[in-house]
Image: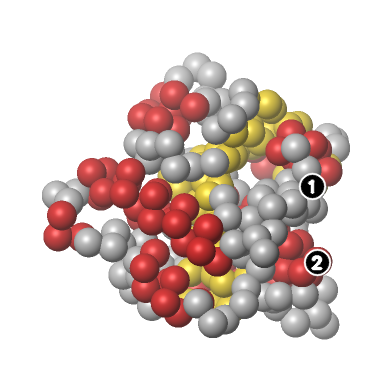
Amino acid sequence: MKNTHSIPTGLAPLDSALGGGLRPGTLTVIAGRPGMGMTSLALQIANHIASAARKKAWLYTGGAGERNPADVLGKLLRFRDSCVPIPFILCDGPHRSAAIIERELTDRPVSSVVIDELVSLAPNRPERYGNFSAALPAMAQELKHLARTLNVPVICNAHLSRDLEARVDPHPDMADFAYALPMGKAVDTVLLLYRSGYYDPFARQAQFEPAQITVAQRHGGEKTVSCRWDSRFLRFEEGER
């Protein structure tokens, strides 16, 4: 029987905006400018889900790209007790597609799937597309199919356009997401990240800085969650300081 209940993310205000948390069989995209905290939030959520379910999460770091897989797990160690085993199955092989991931995980129970960088993923039939943007709608459908087949949340990180930084108000919205990531209607939830310290060097000097997560769901409007970013442990926390 399919599990349809909401799974808490570990951030109460975010869970409230999501209607309880993330649902199995759904696709969530965390988007923002590079360095905004997408990887940290995805690891934080997947870590909480894995701990509650007592099943490891599957983490794809993108193989031979710019990101070192050890750096990704290093972020996880910053906000976990070092005595507790890391609840992730790490995959760093290049050019994985959703179909390949599905075959690898069919008989391997996991609590969630995390794609650290969408750009590192390959479409199931790459020869059909001339460029990455053209493949995005199909890739979103493939990730949604993966989520439904495994009956787990699939979380994917993606970058918004550099044009965002040239605006007077750099807070991202769904128009920015649609422009940079034309993924169609397969995405169930979008989490848009904003940290004031990303643009303000004085804010970065403090351990805590104000942060916002804009939640947009396919069957609902946009909601903004106020929280704070802990620069020491690289994680989002409830409340503001």
Q: Nearer the viewer, residue 144 or 38?
A: 144
- Mark seen at residue 52: 2
Image position of 63 with respect to 127: above or below: below
| The furthest residue to the top | 168
Q: Is mark 1 in CB contact (under 8 Å) with mark 2?
A: no
Mark 1 falls on what kind of element?
Answer: loop
Mark 2 falls on what kind of element?
Answer: helix
Q: Give the colour scheme shown.
A: secondary structure
Q: Which residue is mark 1?
A: 11
Question: Taking the image as drawn, is residue 179 in sight?
Answer: yes
Amino acid type for the residue under numbered disc 1: Leu
Label 1 to label 2: alpha-carbon separation:
14 Å
At x 49%, y 27%, the residue is: 174
At x 64%, y 56%, the residue is: 24
The N terminus lies in quadrant: bottom right
Report x, y in % for residue 16: 79, 37
Amino acid type for the residue under numbered disc 2: Ala
Question: Taking the image as drawn, is residue 43 in sight?
Answer: no
Mark 1 closeness class: few <14, some 14–19, many ≥20 residues within 10 Å = some
Report x, y in % for residue 143: 44, 56
Q: Nearer the viewer, residue 241 or 238?
A: 238
Q: Is residue 135 left or right of residue 165?
A: left
At x 83%, y 43%, the residue is: 12
Q: Earlier in the sequence, mark 1 or mark 2?
A: 1
Quarter holding residue 197: top right
Quarter holding residue 190: top right
